Amino acid sequence: MREWQVKRRERTRQLIELGGLVAKADLVELTDDDRAALYGALLTVAAKLRGLDGAQALVLFRRKGKRAFEAEEASP
């Protein structure tokens, strides 16, 4: 397989996984599948991460996400 095909498949997989996280967080339902609202929310998160307290925000986001993954694994 050519290198560009491998990279394309890797990128496709990454995009699918990221879309899965958006769905897993119930953002699709909460926004009634409003793509502009979803994009705006993601831009807001990106702006926060670029801000002065971005490193701290990332730690908090990561901690919350890790806890959610662990809680999901623990539930039947």
Image (cartoon, grey):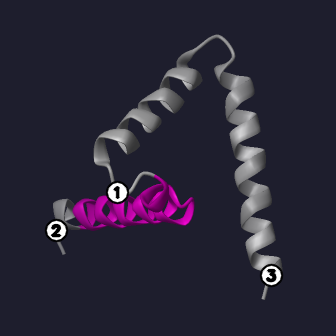
Pointer 2 or 1: first along the chain: 2
CB atoms at circles 2 and 1 under 8 Å apart? Answer: no
Q: Report, in whole angstroms, how far the alpha carbon at label 1 lies from the one at label 3.
A: 27 Å
In the image, residue 17 lies in the stretch drawn in magenta: yes
- In the foreground, 32 or 14: 32
Q: Which residue position is annotated with label 2? A: 2
76 displayed left or right of 28: right
Residue at the extreme top: 52
* Mark 2 element type: loop
| Majority secondary structure in the magenta region | helix
The magenta segment: 6-30
Q: Position of residue 32 (x, y in %)?
A: 38, 57
Pointer 3 or 2: first along the chain: 2
Splitting the image into 4 quarters, where does residue 43 fall? Answer: top left
Q: Which residue position is annotated with label 1? A: 33
Pointer 1 or 3: first along the chain: 1
* Mark 3 element type: loop
